[in-house]
Amino acid sequence: MASSHRDTSRTSRRWWVWLILLLIAGGAIAVVGWYQLFREEPQRFDSVEAYYLYGSIGAEQEEGIPYWIWRVLPDVFPQHLPGEGGYAALGMLWEEGEATPTGFSRKTIGFPRIAINCAACHTASYRIAEDAERQIVPTGPHQTFDPQAYLTFLGNAANDPDFTAAALLPAIEAETDLSWLDRLLYRFLIIPRTRDGLQEQATRFTWTDERPRWGPGRIDPFNPVKFHPDLLALDPAEDDTIGNSDIMPLWAMDEQEGFALHWDGLNDSLTEVVLSGAIGDGARPDSLPVDDLANLEAYLLTKRPPPYPFLDDLDPGLATEGEAVFQQTCAGCHGLEGARTGTVIPQPEVGTDPHRLEMWTAEAAERYNAYAEEYPWDFNAFVKTDGYVAKPLTGIWLRAPYLHNGSVPTLEDLLQPADQRPRRFYRGYDVYHPERLGFIHDGEAAERQGFLYDTAEPGNGNQGHEGAAFGTQLDDDDKAALIEYLKTL
C-alpha cells in the first residue's frame, strides 16, 4: 500500500512537472510570437520636419506592408510597373541615404512595416532644368507621385502567380539577413497574409476602374473612405461620383485660420483635417498618434513655401504694376485680407467642374461627425457646401497645374478663356517653365515622363474661372504684369 501510494505520488508529480514545463514552453512561444509579430518600437526623429516626411500616422497596423516584401516587389515584378527605375517609375521622391521615399513611414510592429503618411501626397518637387538637381519641398503639392498607379502595382503584384515565398524570400535575403524564425514566419505567415491583404485592397478599389484615371499629382480624397466597407461606411452603397482632385499644399496654414478647408470647404478645423487625413491614409481611431499629429499641425502653421527660383530675372517695376492689377482684380477672393478669401464661392458663380463638389454628401458629413464620438478627440465640423473655396495664393508658382482638378497647366493659361486653354497636356513632369508660371507640359520629355490629361474626361473639365472678375478679360500687358507679381507670393 505504501509503495503504491509513493508510485502514485511520483506519477502525479511527473504530470505536474510536465504540465508546468508545457505552460512555460507555451508562454515562451507566446512571448516570442508576440515579440516577432506585435512588439512596437518607437520612432525617433531629429526634427518635426523629419517626422512629417517619414513618421508614422498610425497606419502600419492595419494598412502597413512588411517592409522587406515592399522593398523587393519592383525587383520581382518589374513587369507590373509603368516604367523603369523601381518605385521612381511611380513618381516617388527619394532623399539621398533614406530607406524609404518621402511620405512613407518605416516602423517596427513585430517586424518592419511600411505605410504612407501625409507627405506621400503633400511633398512637392521641381527642377529649374532637365539636368538640374531636383528640389524637394515638404508640405507642397506632389506633382509626380501617382497614388492610383501605386495601388494598381501592388494589386497586380499580389495577383501574380509568382507572389510566393519561393520567389520573394531569395530576393529579401539578398537585401537583409533573416533569422531562421523570421524565414519561417515570412514563408508560412507574413508572405501569404500580405498577398491576401493586397488582393483585398485591390478589390476595394475596383470602383476606380469605372472612373477617369487620377494621374500623378491627383487623388480622389474621400470616395475611398466613403466606399470602404470596414472603415466608415459613410455612404452604405457606392455611387457614381468622381472626386478626382489636384493635391493641395499644406504650407502657411496659419494664413488660413478660420477659413474653409479642402477644395470645397467641407471642414474649417485644421485639427480635424489632420486627424481625418490620417484616417483616410489607413490609421484607425485607436492607432492615431494624437500628440504627434498635434506637433505636426503646429509645423504646418508656420512652414513656408520656397521663394520663386528665378527671382534674379524678376522685373520689379512690372511686378509693382502687377500688384495693382492683383488688388483690383484678384485680392477680394485671393488676398489675405480679401472679403471672400477663405469662403466658399458657389459653383455656378465660379463655373468650374462640379464633380468634386458632388462627391461629398450631407450624409457623409453627418456620419463623419458621428464617427469619433467615443474617443477623446472628436469630429464636429464636417459640412456639405455648394461651391469651392477661394484660397490665398501663397506659393502659387509651385501649385501648378491649376483649378481644383488640376485641369489648367499654367497661370498664363488660366488667364485665358476656357476655349483657349490646352485641352490635352502632360502632367507629372517637374521641370519648371518660368515664363508661363507652371511646369513644362508638352514636348518629348514631358510626354516620356508625364501622364496625358484630357479635359474631355468627366471630372477633368477646365471650364470656369472666366470673365472680368477672374482676370480673363485683362489685356495682355496687365496679364503679363499680374503674372510677374504672382511670382513674388
Image: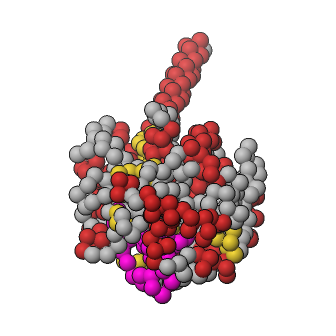
The answer to whether residue 22 shows anywhere in this view is no
Q: Position of residue 345 (x, y in %)?
A: 68, 72
Which quadrant would residue 217 be assigned to in this image?
bottom left
Is residue 149 shown left or right of residue 351?
left
> Where is the N terminus found, in terms of image quarters?
top right
Which quadrant would residue 427 be assigned to in this image?
bottom left
Figure check: 314 above or below 51: below
* Dominant secondary structure of the residues highlighted in magenta in the image: loop
Does 397 appear in magenta?
Answer: no
Foreground pick, 344 / 233:
344
Name the image colouring: secondary structure
Is residue 84 shown left or right of residue 112?
left
Figure check: 319 above or below 214: above
Q: Position of residue 489 (x, y in %)?
A: 51, 56
Q: Residue at the location (48% across, 41% down)? A: 49
Q: Residue at the location (76% across, 56% down)? A: 380
Which residue appears farthest toward the top when viewing the image?
2
Is residue 84 shown left or right of residue 276?
left
Total marks placed: 0
Q: Residue at the location (63% across, 57% down)? A: 336
Q: Position of residue 153 (x, y in %)?
A: 37, 65
Q: Position of residue 375 (x, y in %)?
A: 73, 46
The answer to whether residue 174 shows anywhere in this view is yes
**Magenta highlight range:** 401-430
Which residue appears farthest toward the front when viewing the image?
317
Q: Residue at the location (48% across, 51% down)? A: 305
Foreground pick, 314 / 286:
314
